[in-house]
Image: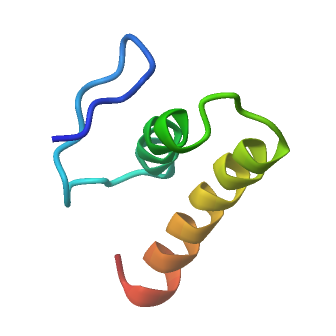
Amino acid sequence: MVHSPTEGHEPVDEGSVRTAEQARNVARGFMLVAAPKGGNEVAAVLLVVPELFTNAVQHAGG
């Protein structure tokens, strides 16, 4: 189980990401471990992940 790093969000079970916001929260949790100091790279990942998720849903049928 992956837990969102932001308080107030529900935990996200693996395989049940259903919104771009949930995808971004999962990516944020990963980036907190992979790049704890943050930076431009983290901002880029958090910008791209929701776009990739939205494109996958739109073009691959969810």
Indicate the position of residue 55 as horizontal and vertical percent values: 57, 76
Q: Residue at x 45, y 19 (%)?
A: 6
Q: Name the residue rendered at 54%, 42% in the picture.
A: 31
Question: Looking at the picture, does residue 50 appear above or below residue 53?
Answer: above
Q: Which residue is the extreme one toward the right?
A: 40
Q: Is residue 5 left or right of residue 37?
A: left
Q: Nearer the viewer, residue 44 or 35?
A: 35
Q: Residue at x 69, y 28 (%)?
A: 37
Residue furthest to the top: 7
Where does the C terminus fall, quadrant-wise?
bottom left
State which quarter of the image contains the N terminus. top left
Count of numbered circles on the image: 0
24 in relation to 37, above or below: below
Task: Give the image's coloring scheme.
Answer: rainbow
Spot occupied by residue 24 in the image (x, y as percentages of width and height): 52, 45
Name the one closer to the observer, 32 or 27: 32
The spot of residue 14 in percent (x, y) is 19, 53
